[in-house]
Amino acid sequence: MTSNSENDKLVISEDPSHPANLIPSLSPSGVQKERMIPCDIFVMDKISQKLLRSPNPPIKPSQCTPLFFNSFNKRNATACIHTHSQNAVLVTMLYDKEFTISNQEMIKGIRRDGMGVNLKYFDTLVVPIIDNTAEERDLTSFMAVAMDKYPETCAILVRNHGVYVWADTWERAKTMCECYDYLFELAVKMKSMGLTS
């Protein structure tokens, strides 16, 4: 299925309750994200994961698609952000199986997934770290296992690669992604100074 005016109605709408703003839409591979337009977006059925709308070739879906669906299906997220943040990569080099930090103000910007509340200043933020694989899609089962083991996390770090962050809205996912990145950077700097996080 490719782009046409009828299918474009799946990705273009001003109405916040329109399906265009409620169904899984995925960014394409190899397209500069800041230059994307709605017609570049893939739309998939949440249950079958079949494409409902596809941009014109040669645009392909992201290899991250199955990982995004982990967050949609296992956590009922509506948004998942994947970044190759240097701070995320560095903390995976400094921590073994989990990134932990506490007593930091920015922790209050992170949700306890499924709990409907944010972490508090004195809480310890724990983010699981999984090892990277040769192909992004091969991370899917490892991410799923980590999500099961850490039911309150809203993020998974991938060693020497980056981080996945999800939430119930894109706005909350973006805010948490910024908070996580701040905390990752802070932890890296603290380690370089010999401070504990």
Image (spheres, rainbow, N blue to C red):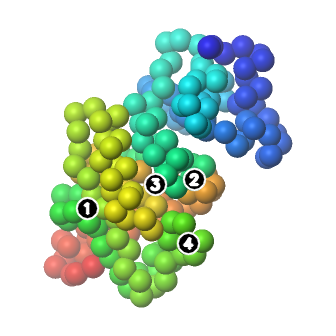
Residue under circle 1?
91
Earlier sequence position, callout 4 versus callout 2 = 2
Q: Residue type at mark 2?
A: Asn
Q: Nearer the viewer, mark 4 or mark 3?
A: 4
The disc labelled 4 sits on which kind of residue? Met
22 displayed left or right of 15: left
From the viewer's perspective, is the residue at label 1 or at label 3 nearer? Answer: 3
**Foreground: disc 2 or disc 1:** 2
Residue type, mark 3 in image: Val
Callout 4: SS: loop
User: Which quadrant, please, contains the N terminus?
Assistant: top right
In the rendered image, which residue does mark 3 sit on? 165
Q: Which mark is first along the chain, 3 or 4?
A: 4
Q: Amino acid at mark 1?
A: Val
Q: How packed is label 4: few (under 14 Cα within 10 Å), some, or many (20 or more)? A: few
Mark 4 or 1, nearer chain start: 1
Measured Cα–Cα span from mark 4 to mark 2: 13 Å
Instruction: Determine if residue 41 is in view.
Output: no
Q: Which tag is nearer the camera, tag 2 or tag 3?
A: 2
User: Where in the figure is residue 13, as x and y percent of width and height?
Assistant: 79, 35
Sequence-wise, the earlier of marks 2 and 3 is 2
